[in-house]
Image (cartoon, rainbow, N blue to C red):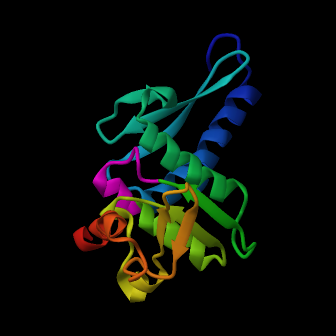
Amino acid sequence: VRAGTSSVAESLRAKIQRNVDKNINAKFKDFYKTEEVCLSLSFNTNSISFMVRTGDGESLKLSERSNGLRWYLETFLDAQANDVNGKNIVYLLDEPGVSLHINAQKELQCLFKDLVEQDNQLLYTTHSPYMLNLEDGGIHRIRAVVKDNEGFTKIYKTAYDSKIAPKHQQDTLVPLVNA
């Protein structure tokens, strides 16, 4: 027991960490495999700090980790905290893979698939070929979004629609070709 803490407080801290391990760390490993990541808590007199421990044992404050990992973890925690199973939530995400490593972009597809399998809907924009899920007829779920000369946004039923102006076709097709 640390100086100035009671056994009740120490037991509560241990219980909180066990719950973090069970409800966050164990589940997060199913979706994020780029590196081993575990959240741990540091208790101070009036605050709790989240630390991120990697497989090599190094711990950093969450604020010292990359924007991509923080975004990924935040999205995962939001889904866990709000118990999205069967609630038919619509997720609208703008460029979710922007700050993520290529492998993490691919792994994000697992989290997205899990959210959709829980009866939620997911719409996101991307320019990354690694963020396109082409499995199981996925090409038919992809839409091209093009801003016209007047600044209006047009959404096409397919990414390869013949109505897309030639100057925009390459921009919309490059991620698909690369995928």
- The residue at the point 72 percent across, 74 percent down is 88
Asked if residue 102 can be seen in this view, the reply is yes
Judge left or right: residue 172 versus residue 11.
left
Q: Indicate the quadrant containing the C terminus: top left, top right, bottom left or bottom right.
A: bottom left
- The residue at the point 63 percent across, 76 percent down is 118
Question: Is 50 rendered above or below residue 94?
Answer: above
- The residue at the point 49 percent across, 55 percent down is 28
Circle count: 0
User: Could you say which is closer to the camera, residue 17 or residue 155?
Assistant: 155
Q: Quadrant of residue 164?
A: bottom left
Rendering coords of residue 62 (x, y %):
50, 31
Q: Quadrant of residue 161?
A: bottom left
User: Could you say which is closer to the camera, residue 150 or residue 78?
Assistant: 150
Magenta span: 96-107
* Residue sticking out furthest to the top: 3
Question: Is 33 rendered above or below residue 133?
Answer: above
Q: Indicate the quadrant containing the N terminus: top left, top right, bottom left or bottom right.
A: top right
Question: Is 151 rendered above or below residue 12?
Answer: below
- The residue at the point 34 percent across, 59 percent down is 128
Rendering coords of residue 111 (x, y %):
50, 65
Rendering coords of residue 48 (x, y %):
65, 26
* Residue sticking out furthest to the bottom: 137
Rendering coords of residue 99 (x, y %):
40, 44
